[in-house]
Amino acid sequence: MEFNLDLVIHSLPLLLLGAGVTIKITVLSVAVGVVIGLFVGIARISSFRPIRFLAAVYVDFFRGTPLLVQIFLIYFAIPVITGQRMDPFMAAILACGVNSGAYVAEIFRAGIQSIDAGQMEAGRSLGMTWGQTMRYIIVPQAFKRVIPPLGNEFIALLKDSSLVSVIGFEELTRRGQLIIARTYGALEIWFCVAIIYLAMTLTISRFVAYLEKRYKIDDRN
């Protein structure tokens, strides 16, 4: 079997379009996940037991079940409940977003709990409420500490987003499958898909390392 370079060159523009869709899904899903995760992470350390319990149930469910199953549940269950057909793009964002939120919640919880308890006491002694102390003192410090694990979550979700191909959404992996079905060039296309994923993950890793280094420099200044 010979490696067909012409097939790679011809297919590359379509695969790059799929990569753009993959990045879009990942960015939007992580944005949803960060918003959910921040509030759920704070709820996880709340002194109000019912809120803490509900947050724990959310985290345990979405961390304890496969993302693939969650995609199917959202894509097929919501139309049954609402009677409206679920758009594959919205289903992909929602499924990946709520899944990411469970992991981000634990990241934020650990980051917040890593801040010295004296910071909260100092804020309260200045007349701030608990919420104001969290917003202006605790969370900004915790956010700097959670940049590396948030970067890892972004990379993990970038790769896991390939699972949305099961509902027919044409991101990078699905584009590769469609090209293979037409050309039978499995070796060439999967190799190209792997290289594109590698390029994206390495770029994100370098960007996260840059942010981590920059925030450390700012702290020293």
Image (cartoon, rainbow, N blue to C red):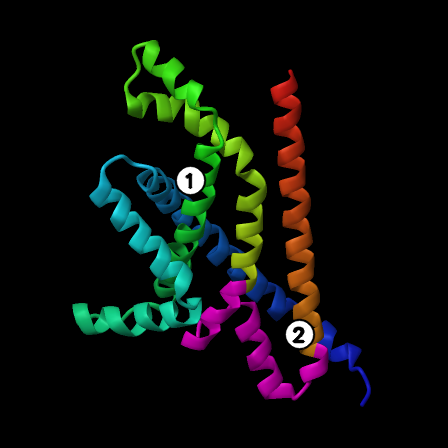
Q: What stretch is highlighted in magenta?
A: 160-188
- State the residue at coordinates (41%, 59%): 63
Identify the residue under disc 2. Answer: 11
Q: Which amino acid does label 2 sit on?
A: Ser
Give the residue displayed 49% in from the left and 27% down from the top: 141
**Residue 80 spot, x, y in % from top left:** 20, 74
Residue 153 visible from this viewpoint: yes
Q: Residue 82 appears at what percent x and percent y? A: 17, 68
Q: In this view, does 11 lie to the left or right of 155?
A: right
For residue 69, what is the image quadrant? bottom left
Query: Is residue 40 on the magenta stretch?
Result: no
Q: Is residue 94 at all visible to an observer of this figure?
A: no
- For the point 62% across and 83% down, the residue is 180
Category of crowding for the residue at label 2, using alpha-carbon neighbours closer than 10 angstroms: few (below 14), some (14–19), many (at least 20): some
- Mark 1 sits on what residue? 109
Nearer to me, 4 or 61 = 61
